[in-house]
Image (tube, rainbow, N blue to C red):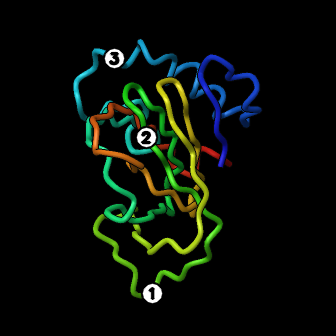
Amino acid sequence: MITGNLQALERATLPPVLERIMREVVISVEHWEGRSIGRVDVDGDHLFCLVQEDLTEPLDERRGEFHQEYLDIQLLLSGREWIGVGPQQYRLEGLSHPHPDLWFVEVEQESWLAMRPGDFAVFYPGELHRPLCTLGLPAPVRKLVVKVHKSLLA
């Protein structure tokens, strides 16, 4: 996992392929503010963006998740969000698997990222994260999730 803010992108020390994606695809919060909700293709199923609007939820209502095929770059565009992150070990057997590359797990140990607009988090395949959490009342957020197929990381 890598975290940072777009205003200090150079401090994140991203691998070259991810730095290029941040500079050429993510660009800025303002670049995505007026975009419609939904998928934006960049390179077919290898690299695409999801513009999302959602409500945060109390911690006990969110499940941890991970992906095996895709890296996530999650950028908060507006609102406030807490993302749980953890080094938890897990097995695939018996896990909830509602979509081709989405696995849900019960979280046993985690740390928290307090996200504000312009903050981003990079989750590599297999890294546990629990997005869209709140410590208070549910509130609207707008975010960009960039899906990067693991083949682009080689």
Q: Which residue corresponds to mark 3? A: 33
First along the sequence among labels 3 and 1? 3
Figure quadrant of residue 121: top right
Residue 29 point in image, percent of width and height: 45, 18
Which of 50/84 is in front? 84
Amino acid type of the residue that numbered disc 3 sits on in the rendered structure: Glu
Amino acid type of the residue that numbered disc 1 sits on in the rendered structure: Glu
Gap in Å between the C-alphas at discs 3 and 1? 40 Å
Residue 60 point in image, percent of width and height: 36, 65
Q: Which residue corresponds to mark 2? A: 81
Which of 41/63 is in front? 63
Mark 1: few/some/many CA within 10 Å (<14, 14-19, 20+): few
Q: Is residue 66 above or below residue 13?
A: below
Tell me what residue is drawn at x 22 percent, y 24 percent.
Answer: 36
Frontmost of labels 1 and 2 is: 2
Amino acid type of the residue that numbered disc 2 sits on in the rendered structure: Glu
Q: Which residue corresponds to mark 1? A: 93
Residue 72 point in image, percent of width and height: 50, 46
Tell me what residue is drawn at x 52 percent, y 17 percent.
Answer: 27
